[in-house]
Image (tube, rainbow, N blue to C red):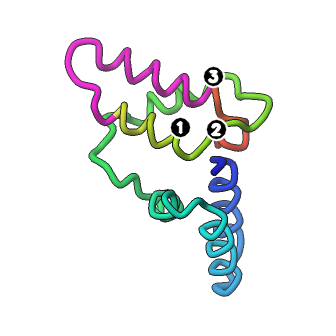
Amino acid sequence: MMWLEVVSCWRDVAATRKRTEKIRRLALTLSAAPPERRPLVALYLAGQLGRPPLGVGPALVCEAAQVPPAQAASLQVVHVDDTFAALAEVRGAGAAVRRRELLADLFGRATAEEQR
């Protein structure tokens, strides 16, 4: 599933006050996700990562957000999840540099809408 679909759903849900519209939009997105990815998509739509802390603070996110966006959407949910898994495992000497590289790569693969 494309990450843009998750981002668009999240924005649509945040933009409406109607409970039935929120449910309809969430159900549409979850039903479009491959069955094996639905739990992961549901976690992301709920604002959860489903893993230990990533060791990434606001300053690092702001820095990564300066990376020019991709021109076309190609980022998949699995790519985002793989990056988060890698971030959660980074430890030791050079950890800050590695986290910066991982985030810059992720943001560089995201469109402007996905970066927001």
Seen in the picture, residue 10 relative to 112 is either above or below; the reply is below
Amino acid bearing label 2? Leu
In this orientation, which residue lies closer to the viewer: 74 or 97?
74
Give yes or no for residue 51 being in the magenta stretch: no
Q: Nearer the viewer, residue 112 or 79?
A: 79
For the residues bearing labels 1 and 2, Cβ distance under 8 angstroms: yes
* 72 shown above or below 30: above
Which residue corresponds to mark 2?
75
State the mark number for residue 67: 3
Considering the numbered disc 2 on the image, is that residue within a helix, a strand or a loop?
loop
Q: Residue at x 69, y 48 (%)?
A: 4
Q: Residues within 10 Å of mark 2 (few under 14, many from 20)?
A: many
Q: Which mark is residue 68?
A: none
Q: Nearer the viewer, residue 63 or 35?
A: 35
> What is the number of callouts on the image?
3
Q: Height in image: 2 above or below 101?
A: below
Magenta residue span: 88-108
Query: Distance from label 1 to label 2 (Cα)?
Result: 6 Å
Q: Nearer the viewer, mark 2 or mark 3?
A: 2
Q: Nearer the viewer, mark 1 or mark 3?
A: 1
| Amino acid type shown at disc 1 | His
Query: From this viewpoint, which residue is outermost toward the front?
Result: 35
Q: Residue at x 53, y 37 (%)?
A: 79
Q: Is residue 78 shown left or right of residue 21?
A: left
Q: Which residue is mark 1?
A: 79
Type of the residue with mark 3: Val
Q: Most extreme residue toward the right, as rendered?
A: 71
Residue at the image position 31 percent from the left and 34 percent from the top:
55
**Residue 77 placement (x, y as % from top left):** 56, 46
